[in-house]
């Protein structure tokens, strides 16, 4: 069952990726960021995703005492929540690993 869920998530996320190699990747699109961060989560760092990964890590919040991990987590989670096709479990896994770190 887990293999089926993984395949379904991957197909849904892959559908948001450009079909032609010469198209630009929209790093501001939450679905693209989810797809690229999911790849990064599983050790797949592709050069096409560098903009999307940078976009994710640029979402940071600072308070009086500097970097605020919890507010950063909320800002990143809300951004990834803008992708209606993203599986909430995938977003949760991404946030557990990368949500509070400074990039």
Image (spheres, helix red, strand yellow):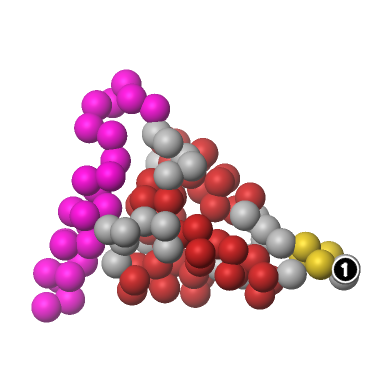
Q: Is residue 39 above or below residue 6?
A: above
Q: In the rendered view, does 59 fall on the left or right side of 65?
A: left
Total numbered labels placed on residues in the image: 1
Magenta run includes residue 91: no
Q: Quadrant of residue 80?
A: bottom left
x and y, in percent, of residue 85 in the image: 27, 58
Q: Is residue 52 above or below residue 69?
A: above
Q: Nearer the viewer, residue 31 or 14?
A: 31
Residue 69 visible in the displayed image = yes
Q: Foreground residue, 23 or 74?
A: 74
Q: Residue at x 57, y 45 (%)?
A: 54
Q: Position of residue 66 (x, y in %)?
A: 83, 65
Q: Residue furthest bottom?
A: 1
Q: Residues within 10 Å of mark 1 (few under 14, many from 20)?
A: few
Q: Quadrant of the C terminus?
A: bottom right
Residue at 67%, 58% in the rendered image:
60
Query: Which element is circle 1 on?
Result: loop
Q: Is residue 43 visible?
A: no
Q: Is residue 88 above or below residue 27?
A: below
Say whether residue 29 is left or right of residue 101: left
Which residue occupies 42% across, 57% down?
82
In magenta segment, residue 7 = yes
Residue found 36% across the figure and 56% down from its top? 83
Residue highlighted by disc 1: 64
Magenta stretch bounds: 1-24
Q: At which x and y percent is residue 84?
A: 31, 59
Image coords of residue 34 (percent x, y): 39, 55
């Amino acid at each position: 069952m887990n293999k089926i869920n993984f395949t379904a998530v991957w197909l849904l996320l892959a559908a948001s990726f450009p079909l032609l190699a010469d198209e630009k990747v929209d790093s501001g699109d939450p679905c693209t960021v989810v797809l690229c961060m999911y790849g990064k989560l599983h050790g797949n760092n592709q050069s096409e995703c560098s903009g999307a990964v940078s976009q994710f890590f640029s979402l940071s919040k600072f308070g009086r005492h500097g970097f605020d991990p919890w507010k950063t987590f909320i800002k990143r989670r809300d951004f990834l929540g803008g992708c209606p096709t993203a599986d909430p479990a995938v977003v949760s896994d991404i946030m557990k690993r990368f949500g509070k770190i400074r990039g």
